[in-house]
Image (cartoon, grey):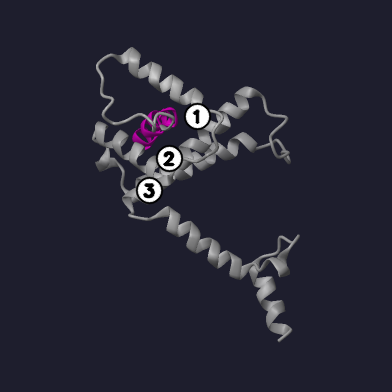
Amino acid sequence: FVFQQKTMAVTLYHIDKLIHTLQLEHSTNNDDTSDVMDNRESTASKMENDADDITVDAIKRVIHDFVEEREWQKFHTPRNLLCALVGEIGELSEIFQWRGEVKCGLPEFSHADKTHLNEEMADCLIYLCRLADVCNVNLKHAVIDKMAKNRKKYPANLVKGSSKKYTHYAQNNNQHK
């Protein structure tokens, strides 16, 4: 299992490069590899300055196709994907371990550190999206629903500037009624 997990992690690392090719049509199955690579490079460079506007569905489709092409569906059980995601979260955490507080924008990070961070974050997103796919979870709806619940738990007028847990506000709110 550990070997399969590491093999999947290493292979899925390369998916983040594929994400940049989403604008290419699936019908671009041209045998001339140099043309395809040129298209990928121009698409990637064109998208570098774009905002994070790729959809969750598009990410899921890229990953699904990647997995299907390799016949890895049998390995992608919810449990295996969750374990792989936890492993990737650990690798992401290691980047920040022992650095103390890190400023937003990561000004102290080297280019290599930022590249490593991008790769680990991509791995986490890939596994999360794949887990959602195999569990039939619509992440867009899940996020919208969860944010609605969070707005009720943490009303802006009560929590602004505080990091206390929602139960603190619920208790105080009930005492004032």
Q: Residue at x 38, y 36 (%)?
A: 5
- In the picture, measured across the screen, residue 69 lies left or right of residue 137, that is left
Q: Is residue 26 above or below residue 166?
A: above
The image position of residue 22, as x and y in percent, is: 39, 33
Quadrant position of residue 43: top left
The quarter holding residue 105 reads: top right
The three-letter amino acid code for the residue at tag 3 is: Leu
Magenta part of the chain:
1-18
The residue carrying mark 2 is 126
Quickly name the residue at label 3: 131
In the rendered structure, does residue 4 fall within the stretch colored magenta?
yes
**What residue sits 64% from the left and 68% below the top?**
166
User: What's the CA distance linking mark 2 and mark 3?
Assistant: 9 Å
Residue with the mark numbered 1: 47
Q: Residue at x 31, y 43 (%)?
A: 76
Residue type for callout 2? Ile
Q: From the viewer's perspective, is the residue at label 1 or at label 2 nearer?
A: 1
Nearer-the-camera pick, 141 or 168: 141
Are there few (<14), some (14-19), or many (20+) residues within 10 Å of tag 3?
many
| Mark 2 or mark 3: whose residue is earlier in sequence | 2
Where 104 sits versus 176, above or below? Answer: above
Q: Is residue 119 magenta?
A: no
SS state under label 2: helix
Residue at 72 percent of width and 84 percent of height: 175
Q: Are marks 2 and 3 in contact (CB under 8 Å)?
A: no
Instruction: Mark 2: give few (<14), some (14-19) or many (20+) Cα within 10 Å.
Output: many
> Closer to the camera: disc 1 or disc 3?
1
**Which of the two discs, 1 and 2, labels the residue nearer the N terminus?**
1
Residue 6 position in % (x across, y down): 40, 32
Residue at disc 3, secondary structure: helix
Asked if labels 2 and 1 touch by Cβ distance under 8 angstroms, the answer is no
